[in-house]
Image (tube, rainbow, N blue to C red):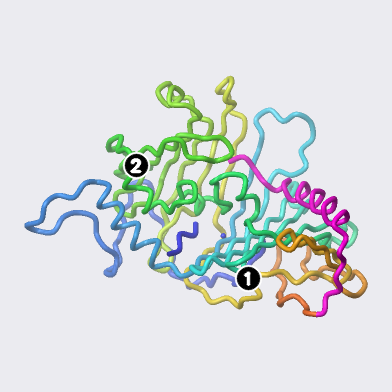
Amino acid sequence: MLVRTPLTILVILSLSSPIATFEARGQVHEESSRPRSGTVAGASTPSPIDSLVKTLTWELESRNAIEVRVHHKFIATKPEGPVAHDNCVEHYIEMSRQERFYDIIFQLGDDPTYRITHDSDGLRCATVTYRLDKEARVFRQSGVVVKRHFAIEENSDRMERPNPIQLLYVGRVPLNLALPKATVLGKVETMGRPCIRVLFPRVRWAVAQDHVYDLDEATGLPLKVEAYLEPDDRANRRPVWVWEADSLDAVDGHYLSKNSRQIEYNPETSEKSMNRTYVVEFVKFNGDYPKSTFWPEPAPGVTVLDAIKNETRETPGKPTDETARATPVKNPIRATPPSNWSWIGSRAAFGSGLVLLLLGGGLWWRRR
């Protein structure tokens, strides 16, 4: 079952693609194949949770693949000195077979500053870091780590996906499967639409949090999510972050928010600390992708640190230009790694290099 809530575009969105945007007080026009919330004549009234689970299960399990390109802007309310970057372009693809591709290019204004890519072929994962040649405006591979966990997901139950897809999970559990254990807090109106408010206590992100979802009655999708560090904070309305949808959009019979925002708060003072906006610039459901999409091809001369085999290897040949331009244009075509790698058995080199590469890769992570 896929719940894929994905920096550059692999497939350009056609202007003729059927996309409809629902305004704040618009109506959702249900597809004939979509299960409708409500009751059947003569049947007993289902609980709000039952209706949401039914609607969400159809929405999420009918997706064999999802691809998104998200422009994510983030501005600190009180920056402490110059900032390294203030936005990023996130390109994400996920298949129902657990294959995943996540490419993030950080930028300061329109100038690229940093890039990192995460891959999973369904059995193993890889992280590729890059260095920026500012003069040539080209990213060149600086290292590859092969490991068991995607991105930094070994550190918590927080799944690494761009918003709003990330919010289709409660920790590692798909939203439709987590709902039966949620506490219903009542009915509310969010974005001018009727919603069911539910509580998921102590979700284990980097720090355990209570998550409160406002779920759209018609589609089951979240239109607002609030996070609280402690139950007392929830009682006193002191969130650490609040995500809100600004639109609810239909693409090829599926739904998601193409425009959303998030505000983060200082947990000590409750003052705003960060403003984020998310614009889904491209989305595609149920596309076909070659297997090479989900595994990197190390460039010649690049060291590969294999944390699964506890080995270090170096791709043969001299370092060459990375084919992906630094500016967010078409993503490079990637192939499976060459089979004639030379092998290096130094555990000391492996250990020190792995630490440095993972530290560098950790820079991409944002507290959201």
Residue located at (63% from left, 67% from top): 9
Query: What is the C-alpha distance between the residues marked 2 and 1?
Result: 37 Å
- Span colored in magenta: 340-368
Mark 1, Cα crowd under 10 Å, few <14 / some 14-19 / many 20+, is some
Q: Is residue 128 above or below residue 77?
A: below
Nearest to the observer: residue 104 or residue 203: 203
Amino acid at pointer 1: Leu
**Which secondary structure, mark 1?**
loop
Q: Provide the secondary structure element on which disc 2 rests.
A: loop
Mark 2 touches mark 1? (CB < 8 Å)? no
Dominant secondary-structure state across the stretch colored magenta: helix
Q: Give the mark nearer the N terminus: 2 vs 1.
A: 1
The residue to which callout 2 is attached is: 182
Viewer-side residue, 115 vs 302: 302
As rendered, which of 69 and 165 lies closer to the eye? 165
> At which x and y percent is residue 108?
75, 47
Q: Which residue is mark 1?
A: 10
Q: Position of residue 30 (x, y in %)?
A: 29, 62
Image location of residue 233, percent across then percent down: 46, 24
Q: Residue at x 82, y 79 (%)?
A: 340
Question: Which amino acid, by three-letter code, is at mark 2?
Answer: Ala
